[in-house]
Image (cartoon, grey):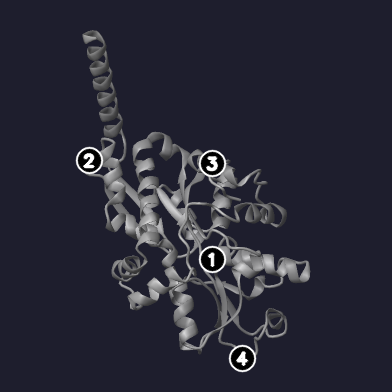
Amino acid sequence: MLRKIIIAAGTALAAALSVTTVAKAEVDTLKIVQQFGLVFLPIHVAIDHGLIEAHAAENGIEDLNVELFQIGGGSNTLRTLIAGEADFAGMGIPPALTLWSRTDGEFRAALATGGAPMRLLTIDPDIQEVEDYQTHRDHQIAVPSIGTSNQYIIMQMLSQQLYDDHTRFDDLMVSMAHPAAAQAMIAGNQPVQTHFATPPFTLREMEAGAREIINSYEIFGAPHTGVVMMGSETFREENPIVAQAFVDGVSDAIDWINANPAEAGELFVRFTGSSQPADEATGLITNGDVTFSTVPVGIQAYGDFLSEFGDLRPLPSWQDLFTPSNHALDGN
């Protein structure tokens, strides 16, 4: 009996030393990049509540620093992640699939964080339905980035559905970050007369008189994930504790948001310095306009479209885009 206890203690000590060794080898600063919008609230909560650091500390890494950077557009996010200037980056599904395809799976999604219907909003009185864009082509449609953003690809999906040609809206779309596009729409005297927007920008623009022509859930035929957190397999293999702490911390944040929507709305306004009333942000959460979930939905539909009409390799299954910890989820 004594011998077993000594062996157990020795094993535990060896394991502890092993954890300490791994911890020293892992990064001491985790760098995260996000874009704009309420869909990135789980990252805000995880950082504000210190959830990532707490999970790292539980597994032997004390004093982990977490840095958050904000940039606009999927293309810029891709470049930042590939250049090694960030460890994880939040992005839409098309840029995530582009990154996965062109690096032969070196970059994968650590987790999904949720989604929201993207709304095609216009202030042009001549645009009453989608088909009007073919006869009134004297203004621009703002999307976060050309070629890779959710909005750009969904406009191509819509074009394919209507005209059996996925390019009919391409020459109308311009790259513009959501805050700048919202300002242009509210000002009303800019070339941008339509914005494919996400919350909370949708609410601001509609309050200023913009009208919805169609939304992404209608085009897609179902709700879909809007944001995934991408990282490299190399980072995950070299920093397993920090990488898992990130996943666990953001997952905890999603659970907290869904359990505490009022507090989550207040946190969004405080964390981002938004001028939006907190109850409006809360309303977007409670009315289902924005959903927070780690279950990926709509991934395969994006993958199939981009392999057929883009230059990406086929996506055998939605699981191929994600790290193994996601594979048992009821995704599609």
User: Which comes sooner in the sequence, label 2 or label 3?
Assistant: 2
Mark 3 touches mark 1? (CB < 8 Å): no
Q: Mark 3 packing: few (<14 Cα in 10 Å), some, or many (20+)?
A: few
Q: For mark 4, what is the residue?
A: 125
Left or right of 101: which side holds 11? Answer: left
Label 2 SS: loop
Q: Position of residue 73 (x, y in %)?
A: 49, 64
As measured in the structure, the alpha-carbon distance from the residue carrying label 2 to the one carrying label 4 is 58 Å
As measured in the structure, the alpha-carbon distance from the residue carrying label 4 to the one carrying label 1 is 25 Å
Residue 47, numbered circle: none
Q: Position of residue 259 (x, y in %)?
A: 37, 60
User: Which comes sooner in the sequence, label 4 or label 1?
Assistant: 4
Q: For mark 3, what is the residue?
A: 328
Q: Between label 2 and label 3, give the one nearer the viewer.
A: 3
Please tell me which residue is depicted at 65% across the width and 50% down the height of the picture. 312
* Residue 209 visible somewhere in the drawing: yes
Q: Position of residue 33 (x, y in %)?
A: 39, 56
Q: Between label 4 and label 3, give the one nearer the viewer.
A: 3
As measured in the structure, the alpha-carbon distance from the residue carrying label 2 to the one carrying label 3 is 31 Å
Give the amino acid type for the residue marked by disc 1 in the picture.
Answer: Ser
User: Which comes sooner in the sequence, label 3 or label 1?
Assistant: 1
Q: For mark 1, what is the residue?
A: 145
Q: For mark 2, what is the residue?
A: 62
